[in-house]
Image (cartoon, rainbow, N blue to C red):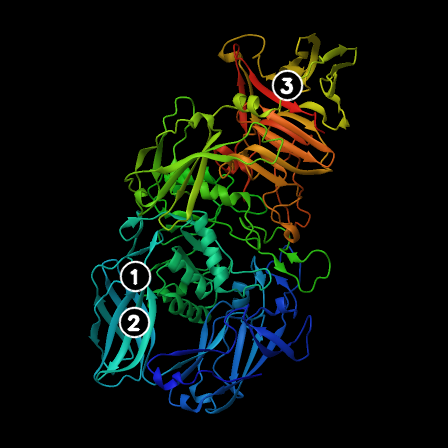
């Protein structure tokens, strides 16, 4: 393929500026075809074409390999195919006399480059790094040139393979990031490394080429998105020195931080006798970082707490070849979770760091080395490439040297050789050099470390998110404990994404591969689908925190609110309340909630770290509403969170929402030795007198398959006595039990409504007093369960917390409201061919009213008991796990359950290693206790 440079009119006119000429496409969505041959695997040993940039597996070449080939996957060796690329391009004659460099933003893994049959330089080793060659002397000017690239997926250097390809991530091959030429004038600024401080002072280390005598540097800054003017500063330089340092200072600059990411364009112009020879432009941010051991990390004088997550650079259809749109999407999703930091296992794309700069995230920039480090020679080169590429990004505040043992102590100092900001170097998972980054701590970690230690700590991995594990589940406990220590500097959850990729070599129904549980660790799906933990994190890490409060008849519109920002006063945020109301029969029809009142809330000044009262004037009809919502937006309009509170208690809602009908025909009750029958015009209910369970329910259309309950969950009981009674408007069956359940009263009204009043845990035992109290520990589930067939279910509409299912330790992130969702069989972190969130099945918090819709009719449930969980069937277990997993706690018997206690969800370790909200509860009953009531209504009339 032949490439001719376009728009050559600019060559002489802009000689003072380096030109960036792409030989590949700018990203995988806009590729350029190169000639290509792969040596092994699919479509191998024949010359064809390939998109550049790309990973060749995603283009249908070679063999897919996951990095745990040596362990769980039991493979003798990884795939080792090689790729040969050819590309022809023309160089204009008037480029002669300029400096031409070819730049590869990333190629996996060993890369040999030739220009016109001649080597461009040493083979580059390392698949995540930008590298370049000066090819000025190898080009044919005014003629055609041939670029040949030989890429070996498996490195000839075993330490590179151990660092990058014996890992827990996908192993790809190919030129997956762009390739371009940088064309500069003969005299030019080759590299700039900046240290821009919060007071406007700037130090820049310059690498200069062919500097004539009497040259100067003119430095200017221009705010991005602003119109402030700053003076140009002229600085002398020594023409005999290639490496020089300049200093400048401007007044009244705006600083960079994640909450106010102010950026400037720094222009450095090389001038000689008034003529501009070359101009280098770099985006910078003014900010001052101080790393104080046994104290904390300070940015612009404020101690920071990093709320972070680990991110892989990946997209299902393109592997590690991404684009700016994906980077901006990911940074926005991270910000939407109220995070302010991100870490990766290797240097990300430049456009990702640019998005972190402009949108505002702290970045821990890591040199790869998953659990093994590079040799000294290779590692030295790779560290230099990483620091020189990324040194000027204000978002980058820490260098990570490998991961979990993947470092080389001999070359830690190399980071500082090329970094005038002198950022700290950490060894993620170790307690190294005064910075404790221990991975997957338990709640009570540790022995003279973390809360009980003396070093600044920030776990660079915690809350492991396999399937539906971790992330949000248990986060609040860990976070609240860590925040108690002044040495706490934050943490990074594992991980952002389920790393499933499109298998171009598969022809069956399954198209995406996460290697089972090995790469299904994300709070987001492969295409960034949001799991329930996304919203839990969003609430737990919200910089605005509401202290617990109920809305009761005494509510006056006030809340106590804490500001957990680092820099931002809450008077810069916007708070708005809404009162929502539904129609009385909303559960039965397609009505939506309506806003009956709304207004802004003036928070006043609340500085970071302060807790103060906010208050709004209640509208006159406030208590006619059903629930209150308050939404906070930051100064850029991004939603921080929406909180909600029910305005009434469950009995009010049950009375409001269950449909009553006038019916003259009286309900009847009859009792035999084995059963009690309650019969109304529309519904017949039969109860077993030996077990207390529902035998059958019938309505005018036939059988309603809600039966085989109530059965006990977390307790034992047996029927003691059954009595019945007839009233004018109802018929009653009273069942007395022995055991954990004291009694249930079944009431059927003339119109067919059914009420179940249960009383549990009423009696302490044979005597009274503290010593004889009845105690049972380790209760993970408690309530009543029934059977109902899952087949034929189509959707549910409910009032309560939603829309996601919950675990005991992951209730935050759901809000009171009117919700609807269609039936789905999503397996969290696995159903990638049809990944529908929120999942249909599981526990749902604070159920008030629900309409379960089926192909054969609808059934409705209503609760007069607050804080009741509705168990809606059992989520399917993963089917493709590679190793031992614990995807979810055991569910109780039955399909539909009404619960007061549900289990917590584990993370990387056992529940016993997590905090108090993850632990089973216990029951303590003493004489005189009234017991635990549960009141439910059932409407089986419209089946």
The dot on residue 755 is 3
SS at mark 3? strand
Q: Earlier in the sequence, mark 2 or mark 1?
A: 1
Query: Which part of the image, by quadrant, shows the N terminus?
Result: bottom right
* Residue 405 in view: no
As displayed, is residue 635 above or below residue 350?
above
Q: Which residue is mark 1?
A: 226
Foreground of the two, 686 or 34: 686
Residue 872, how many percent across, how many down?
A: 64, 34
Say the numbered circle drawn on residue 79. Answer: none
**Structural distance between the alpha carbons of marks 2 and 1:** 16 Å
- Mark 2 touches mark 1? (CB < 8 Å): no
Residue drawn at (52%, 10%), measured in percent from left and top? 928
Helix, strand or loop status at disc 2 = strand
Identify residue for label 2: 267
Q: Is residue 795 visible?
A: yes
In the image, residue 472 sits, relative to residue 697, either above or below, namely below
State the residue at coordinates (56%, 64%).
165
Q: x, y percentage for residue 705?
A: 74, 28
């Amino acid at each position: 393929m032949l490439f001719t440079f376009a728009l050559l009119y600019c060559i002489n006119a802009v000689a003072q500026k380096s030109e960036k000429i792409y030989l590949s496409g700018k990203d995988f969505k806009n590729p350029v075809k190169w000639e290509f041959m792969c040596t092994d695997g699919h479509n191998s040993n024949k010359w064809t074409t390939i998109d550049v940039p790309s990973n060749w597996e995603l283009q249908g070449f070679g063999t897919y390999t996951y990095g745990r080939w040596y362990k769980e996957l039991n493979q003798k060796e990884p795939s080792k195919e090689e790729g040969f690329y050819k590309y022809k391009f023309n160089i204009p004659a008037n480029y002669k006399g300029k400096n031409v460099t070819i730049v590869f933003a990333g190629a996996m893994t060993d890369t040999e480059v030739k220009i016109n049959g001649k080597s461009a330089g040493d083979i580059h080793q390392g698949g995540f790094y930008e590298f370049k060659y000066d090819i000025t002397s190898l080009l044919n000017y005014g003629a055609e040139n041939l670029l040949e690239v030989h890429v070996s997926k498996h490195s000839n250097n075993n330490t590179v393979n151990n660092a990058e390809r014996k890992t827990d991530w996908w192993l790809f091959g190919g030129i997956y990031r762009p390739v371009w030429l940088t064309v500069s004038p003969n005299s030019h600024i080759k590299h700039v490394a900046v240290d821009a401080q919060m007071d406007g002072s700037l130090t820049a280390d310059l690498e200069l080429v062919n500097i004539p005598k009497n040259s100067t540097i003119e430095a200017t800054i221009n705010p991005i998105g602003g119109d402030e003017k700053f003076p140009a500063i002229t600085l002398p330089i020594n023409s005999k020195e290639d490496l020089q340092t300049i200093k400048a200072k401007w007044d009244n600059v705006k600083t960079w931080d994640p909450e106010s990411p102010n950026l400037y364009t720094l222009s450095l112009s090389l001038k000689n006798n008034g003529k501009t020879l070359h101009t280098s432009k770099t985006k910078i941010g003014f900010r001052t970082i101080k790393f104080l051991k046994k104290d904390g990390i300070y940015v612009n004088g404020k101690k920071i707490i990093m709320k972070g997550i680990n991110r892989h650079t990946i997209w299902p259809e393109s592997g590690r070849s991404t684009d700016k749109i994906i980077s901006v999407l990911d940074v926005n999703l991270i910000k939407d979770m109220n995070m302010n930091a991100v870490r990766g296992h290797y240097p990300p794309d430049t456009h990702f760091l640019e998005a972190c700069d402009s949108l505002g995230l702290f970045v821990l920039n890591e040199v790869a080395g998953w659990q093994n480090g590079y040799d000294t020679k290779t590692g030295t080169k790779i560290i230099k490439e990483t620091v020189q590429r990324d040194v000027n990004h204000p978002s980058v505040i820490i260098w990570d040297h490998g991961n979990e043992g993947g470092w080389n102590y001999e070359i830690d100092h190399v980071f500082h050789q090329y970094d005038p900001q002198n950022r700290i170097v950490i060894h993620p998972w170790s307690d190294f050099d005064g910075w404790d980054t221990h991975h997957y701590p338990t709640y009570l970690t540790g022995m003279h470390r973390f809360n009980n230690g003396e070093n600044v700590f920030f776990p660079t991995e915690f809350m492991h998110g396999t399937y539906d594990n971790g992330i949000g589940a248990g986060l609040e406990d860990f976070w609240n404990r860590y925040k108690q220590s002044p040495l706490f500097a934050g943490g990074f959850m594992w991980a952002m994404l389920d790393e499933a990729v499109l298998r171009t070599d598969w022809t069956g129904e399954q198209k995406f591969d996460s290697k089972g549980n090995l790469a299904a660790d994300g709070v987001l799906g492969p295409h960034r689908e949001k799991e329930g933990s996304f919203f839990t994190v969003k609430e737990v890490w919200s910089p605005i925190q509401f202290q617990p409060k109920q809305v009761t008849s005494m509510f006056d519109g006030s809340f106590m609110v804490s500001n957990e920002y680092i820099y931002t006063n809450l008077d810069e945020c916007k708070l708005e309340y809404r009162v929502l109301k539904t129609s009385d029969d909303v559960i039965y029809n397609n009505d939506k909630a309506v806003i009956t009142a709304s207004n802004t809330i003036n928070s006043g000044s609340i500085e970071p770290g302060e807790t103060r009262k906010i208050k709004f004037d209640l509208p006159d009809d406030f208590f006619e509403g059903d629930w209150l919502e308050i939404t906070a937006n930051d100064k850029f309009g991004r939603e921080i969170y929406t909180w909600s509170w029910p305005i009434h208690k469950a009995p009010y809602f049950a009375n409001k929402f269950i449909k009553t009908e006038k019916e003259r025909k009286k309900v009847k009750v009859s009792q035999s030795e084995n059963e009690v029958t309650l019969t109304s015009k529309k519904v017949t209910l039969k109860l077993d007198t030996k077990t207390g369970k529902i035998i059958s329910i019938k309505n005018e259309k036939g059988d309603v398959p809600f039966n085989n309950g109530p059965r006990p969950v977390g307790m034992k009981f047996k029927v003691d006595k059954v009595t019945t009674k007839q009233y004018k408007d109802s018929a009653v069956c009273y069942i007395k039990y022995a055991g954990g359940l004291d009694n249930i009263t079944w009431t059927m009204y003339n119109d067919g409504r059914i009420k179940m009043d249960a009383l549990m845990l009423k009696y302490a035992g044979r005597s009274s007093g503290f010593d004889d109290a009845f105690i049972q520990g380790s209760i993970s589930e408690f309530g009543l369960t029934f059977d109902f067939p899952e087949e034929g279910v189509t959707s549910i509409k409910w009032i309560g917390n939603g829309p996601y299912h919950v675990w005991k330790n992951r209730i935050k992130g759901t809000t009171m409201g009117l919700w609807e969702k269609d039936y789905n069989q999503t397996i969290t972190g696995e159903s990638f061919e049809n990944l529908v969130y929120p999942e249909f099945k599981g526990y749902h918090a604070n159920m008030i009213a629900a309409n379960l819709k089926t192909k054969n009719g609808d059934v409705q449930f209503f609760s007069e008991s607050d804080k009741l969980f509705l168990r809606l069937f059992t989520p399917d277990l993963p089917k493709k796990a590679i190793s031992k997993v614990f995807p979810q706690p055991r569910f109780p018997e039955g399909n539909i359950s009404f619960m007061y206690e549900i289990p917590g969800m584990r993370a990387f370790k056992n529940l016993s290693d997590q905090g108090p909200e993850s632990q089973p509860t216990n029951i303590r009953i003493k004489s005189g206790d009234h017991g635990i009531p549960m009141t439910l209504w059932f409407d089986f009339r419209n089946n």
